[in-house]
Amino acid sequence: MTDYSNDIRQITELKEKAGNSWSAINPEHAARMRAQNKFQTGIDIARYTADIMRNDMEAYDADPAQYTQSLGCWHGFIGQQKMISIKKHFEGKTDRRYLYLSGWMVAALRSEFGPLPDQSMHEKTSVAALIKELYTFLRQADARELGGLFRDLDTARLAKDTAKEASIQDQIDNYVTHVVPIIADIDAGFGNAEATYLMAKQMIEAGACCIQIENQVSDEKQCGHQDGKVTVPHEDFLAKIRAVRYAFLELGVDNGVIVARTDSLGAGLTKQIAVSHTPGDLGDQYNSFLDCEEIAAGDLKNGDVVLNRGGKLLRPKRLPSNLFQFRQGTGEDRCVLDSITSLQNGADLLWIETEKPHIGQIGSMVDRIREVMPNAKLVYNNSPSFNWTLNFRQQVFDAWTEAGKDTAAYNRAELMSADYDATDLALEADERIRTFQADSARQAGIFHHLITLPTYHTAALSTDNLAKEYFGDQGMLGYVANVQRKEIRETIACVKHQNMSGSDIGDDHKEYFSGDAALKAGGKDNTMNQF
């Protein structure tokens, strides 16, 4: 909601005190500018959006159907257009719909080095810069939309249409902002706990209310869907969680949200053997997963590292890379322990990176976590790295086989083929994909569903389609028929690209500042009037 009417009264009082020196100031114009710039700082945004997330988390605890969603956005314009579309298609509301900032997309699209793999090699500050950019574009979307309402209000007043004026005034007073929570990826913290703290502060100051951090080694960080992932002992990771919490508290964002991500399901390596003081402590539990061989004292070789467990000497298997490996099949147990300890030490939400979207697998781990932490909730990556079509067709195939249903017409290894698209198996798989988010929110404790890289893929696909048509036989029709005509008919806001870039806002300001002398761009000869 805006304080539009109150601001008019306050600025009117200031004008009266200032006397003749403010004679040309219109209090309503100033109030409009305030309404169009509701959020003065990134900290204002972080506090506002943190409250939204906390309220949404409580609502989910009461009813898992109230899960939340986001899409990853790699540019401010992309995030802006996403939120404009959401308001357009969902009755002007943004409830339970966020933005996601992917470290992968920052590395691949935002680094001054050019495209990089998701290994934390991009500039640290590029993450905070993208948060600031996203919120700049969202705030500009507010200014643009409110500017249109103010113009409509003036038109209704000139026409003496009091009913229309009252309706528009109500929309202004109850305006829904485009500013929503961003879940922002800090990777593995970009260094030690102090580096994590400093980076977290920058991100919060840019507007982040929610920071996601993972338990990989910073200088060995890999994308969660690639091989070669190396985890750190729990105490190292918990120190970084505490560093992020201190950053939130220092900046007065007391409701800040921390997402603790574990990559242990796919990470079979560790760089360190954890410090352990007593049997069963956290370090000892971490070390218990190491792949070891029992040896006698006489078997020791130069440089060997050994563990004493229950009077036995155990030698962890060390790889040529100097890394130690975990025992096969321990991934789920390590994920559960990672998750419990993270929640016990300041994290608010969990992220378990999996190799496939399987509700049973996710739910079984969440059930174990909830035995210790009953309110455990997940953020889950509905990743484009999964082959969703093949995964779900194979899940249906396996379910049918287990149920004794005839699957002779299907080749499990070839289920991606378009030949199966119209089959009962494929239709059931598509329905499972359609309901995956609602089903897993209910059955597997997933509070927030996100797609990390969707706009990376949509940009590539749409550009490919345009290039094929425009540079081919269709020529200009390739753009007109497949882009502009659709924009007009589907009321895509940026068809008026001058308006989207702030031209009308600039005209309003010119009129405020210069009155009748203003040279405005939006006159009768502006070709934007064709739309």
Image: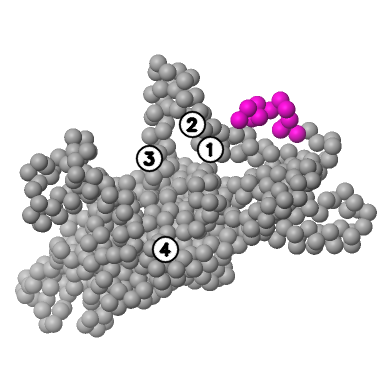
For the residues labelled 3 and 1, the Cα–Cα distance comes to: 20 Å
Which sits earlier in the primary sequence, circle 4 or circle 3?
Answer: 4
Which sits earlier in the primary sequence, circle 2 or circle 3?
Answer: 3
Q: Name the residue under label 2.
A: 486
* Disc 1 + disc 2, Cβ < 8 Å: yes
Question: Which residue shows up at 40% across the image and 39% down it?
Answer: 458
Question: Which residue shows up at 69% across the image and 50% down it?
Answer: 168
Q: Is residue 369 above or below residue 113?
A: below
Q: Mark 1 points at which residue?
A: 492
Residue 285, horizontal then vertical, whole percent: 23, 75
For the residues labelled 2 and 4, the Cα–Cα distance comes to: 33 Å
For the residues labelled 1 and 2, the Cα–Cα distance comes to: 8 Å
Residue 169, horizontal then vertical, whole percent: 70, 54
Q: Mark 3 points at which residue?
A: 457
Q: In which quarter of the image is residue 403?
A: bottom left
- What is the secondary structure assignment of the residue under circle 2? helix
The amino acid pointed to by label 1 is Ile
Q: Main secondary structure of the magenta part?
A: loop
